[in-house]
Amino acid sequence: MAEFAVGRQDFELDGRPVRLLSGALHYFRVHEGQWAHRLAMLGAMGLNCVETYVPWNLHEPEPGRGRDVEALGRFLDAVQAAGLWALVRPGPYICAEWENGGLPHWLTGAPGTRVRTRDPAFLGQVERWFRLLLPQVVRRQIDRGGPVVMVQVENEYGSYGSDEVYLGRLAEMLREIGVTVPLFTSDGPEDHMLTGGSVPGVLATANFGSGAREGFEALRRHRPDGPLMCMEFWCGWFGHWGAEPVVRDPADAAAALEEILRCGASVNLYMAHGGTSFGAWSGANRSGELHDGELRPTVTSYDYDAPVDEYGRPTEKFWLFRDVLALHRGGAPLPDVPAPPAALTGPVRAELVEWAPLSDVMDTLGGPEAEWAMPPTFEALGVARGVVRYRVEVPGPRRPYPLGVTGLRDRAVVYVDGVRAGVLGGGPAEAGSYTALDEPVAGPAAVELWVESLGRVNYGPRLGEPKGITGGVLHERQYLHGVRARGLDLDAFESEDALGRVPFRSPEAASPGLFRGTFDVRGAGDAGVSLPGWGRGFVWVNGFCLGRYWSVGPQESLYVPGTLLREGANEVWVLELEHSGGHLLTFG
């Protein structure tokens, strides 16, 4: 048992000053079989602590249906076994470039619910969730012999709102449920963020990627006492589909880290190891100063240009950070750097010998189809991550008119009388009010629109916005009513023997649909799989969803943890939504 406290100038462990040298590692972005290795990498870099968020929507896909909440507890046990402390950031909102900022779609989609406010309906759901989750944290606090030294209240709230009643109630809730270690908040070092996101009596910390002295000066204007800490030192950044890769010069990042530590502050590297947003859990941003412009979906890889890369390997940034951190550990020797993870022995080819068209997959694994006056949103259909098929009739006879959609979120592949007619939404999607096919459509005609959610917004005032067609389908200026809609959630692929019900047959060239094949492994280890010539979709290996691929780049391959592979036969599925690129995949 030990006592961790917030002193007037320092963090204190049993009354002695200590500095937190922390690194972010999200347990849900690392395959559980690799937790021990990644934590050892953080220790070898010179860190004494690890930070993780908790995504509510991952653990409660439907109201009252918890899913492996114990994963957080198992991770914290692994943290303790690695000899590290832990910072836990349970939300309820986490950002993290994660779908909907971690908030469940069924919560943000509920009419009238005002998330991230004092709204009793929202706070009631948060309290119910916290009472389910927080026992995993409470029993592992440092004053009970565990690794948890601090817990965060909300997350960067000052960049969203100013409801001090809401923040105060969250802090009370954490205490009521049993959190006894210090609480903290984190916000950008700007006046409106620090005033909007801070809680009286709770440690305030700052987030930035450079300019430590200026950042801490801003923090001190609001909090003259208490330890200084950069809770998110942005040593890299995330990427968007269709954009250039984002990298940061390692020497520049190391110099910024050195400045933080020379200020006498504690630090949390964001990210120390980013990992992967498996299962298509990546979120999205909107462009513009007010974050209300074009949708920018985040790629599957969360490598983040971090010091430990997506494959768990040390980068140049790792070695430079290690040198800097070694000077601020009070002379304690650094652990040895673990051996790199095993890699797959040689390239392996998988032949996709079975195929089913999208319509058959939807009819087999999708939810019920119903007719609506206007197109329903994903939320109305109960679809978290996946695809919705909208079907509507153009009456006739009538001459060709423009066919378009208002309020389209993400991207729609459109078929007219069974023939592909175009794609609405352009590249990595847009927020525009109206978008139409290049060629007009005559009536009568049967129209299908296949819309995929490319990730819900995870930051800014558009958090929680609905997905799918949020307006209507127009022929000329006339709405087309009587829309039939059916959703296919990615979770449907996790049900027992899901693919056993799909009517597979031999593949058709360049056709979208669900493909299935096998490959043999001799010498399992980490690998990557690329899909040259394919359009956009998802890949599963042995029933585990690796995430989304998309030909627009910049991500060119999906990471395959070696812990997923087995010696001998392995199975791969590919759900292609636009056009397939052949029947062979290469793992290597």
Image: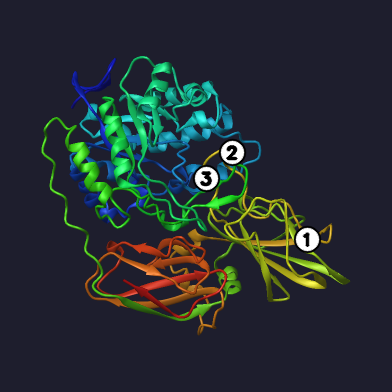
Mark 3 or mark 2, which has the lower sequence index? 3
Q: Can you identify the residue that label 1 sits on? A: 482
Q: Position of residue 490 (x, y in %)?
A: 50, 60
Task: Give the residue type at disc 2.
Answer: Glu
Disc with the residue nearer the chain's start (2 vs 1): 2
302 left or right, relative to 460: left
Distance CA(mark 1)–CA(mark 3): 30 Å
Dot 1 crowding, Cα within 10 Å, few <14, some 14–19, many 20+: some
Location of residue 25 with respect to 584 vertically, above or below: above
Q: Position of residue 336 (x, y in %)?
A: 13, 48
| 3 vs 2, front mark | 2
Q: Position of residue 56 (x, y in %)?
A: 45, 42
Residue type of the residue flagged with mark 1: Gly
Name the foreground residue: 61 vs 163: 163
Question: In front: 273, or 287?
Answer: 287
Which label belongs to residue 100?
A: 3
Which residue is denoted by mark 2 in the rendering? 289
Whether residue 149 appears in this view of the structure is no
Where is residue 569? Give x, y as percent: 30, 76
User: Callout 3: few (<14), some (14-19), or many (20+) C-alpha neighbours within 10 Å?
Assistant: many
